[in-house]
Amino acid sequence: MLAPTRYAPPPHATIRVHPERDARDEAAAFLAEGIVAHVAFVDDGRPVVIPMTYHADDVRRLYLHGGHHSRLMAHLASGAEVCVSVTLADALVFSRTAINHSINYRSVVCFARASASQPDAAAQRELLHAMIARYHPGRTAGVDYAPISDAHLRGTAFVALDVTAWSAKARRGGPKGPHDADPDAPGTAGVAPIASR
């Protein structure tokens, strides 16, 4: 992945609110740890967001798979752009003031189109093994589950996405209200970690 000093996001991928939370140099790591990608696109004039599992080589290449006849796969086959978002929720942040309640998170937003170069059957099989290993560490084809058959590959659309622009953002730390550091102020403040898998 390119370092933040070398990757200058275009206007549509530039962080405008809390630019100090820019974490673009961590985008690949966030994608590697994420579980669900929300894929947004416009279908027949209406916005649609679909949660999906995914795989990422790095921040420049994502992979999705689904039914051949799904509207998302049809959208991607048309060459139209999608927006893919992955968020990791780390902790709930509570403050002595209502407006300063927050959440610690890491997120990536990618703008992408289907690649002109799609994986062949052998590459799809490798990618699916990698996806299973990422979501279920330690599971092995032929031991923990049946090897992926050609019929299963034919029954699923597998799409490589070229990421054209991205942003990544993270909030870390405690509450930032005006009285949160004062133990004698009324109310409570702190951080409640969200259990990870």
Image (tube, helix red, strand yellow):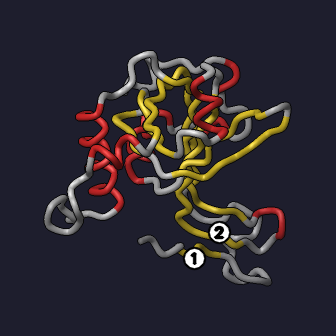
- Are discs 1 and 2 less than 8 Å apart at CB? yes
In screen coordinates, is 59 left or right of 66? left
Secondary element under disc 1, as helix, strand or loop, is strand
Quadrant location, the C terminus: bottom left
Q: Quadrant of residue 28?
A: top left
**Residue 21 in view:** no
Nearest the viewer among 171 and 143 is: 143
Labels 1 and 2: the sequence-earlier one: 2
Name the residue: 47% across, 43% down: 65
The disc label shown at residue 123, or none: none
Task: Give the amino acid type for the residue marked by disc 2 in the picture.
Answer: Val
Residue 108, percent from left and from top: 55, 41
Q: Can residue 94 be seen in this snapshot? A: yes
Q: Is 107 or 51 nearer to us in this picture?
A: 51
> SS of the residue at dot 2?
strand
Please name the residue shown 33% across and 46% down the image: 151
The residue at the far left in this view is: 143
Answer above or below: position of 9 versus 21. above
* Residue at the (46%, 25%) spot, across then down: 4
Q: In the drawing, what numbered circle is on residue 93?
A: 2
Can you give x and y, in whole percent of width and height, for residue 18 in the image? 69, 41
Please give the residue where the numbered disc 1 appears in the rendered image: 192
Most foreground residue, 134 or 172: 134
Gap in angstroms between the C-alphas marked 1 and 2? 6 Å
For badge 1, the amino acid type reads Ala
Q: Is residue 140 above or below residue 155?
A: below
Residue 124: which quarter of the image?
top left
Q: Position of residue 56 (x, y in %)?
A: 39, 39
Q: Mark 2: few, some, or many residues within 10 Å (few <14, many ≥20)?
A: many
Q: Quadrant of the N terminus?
A: top left
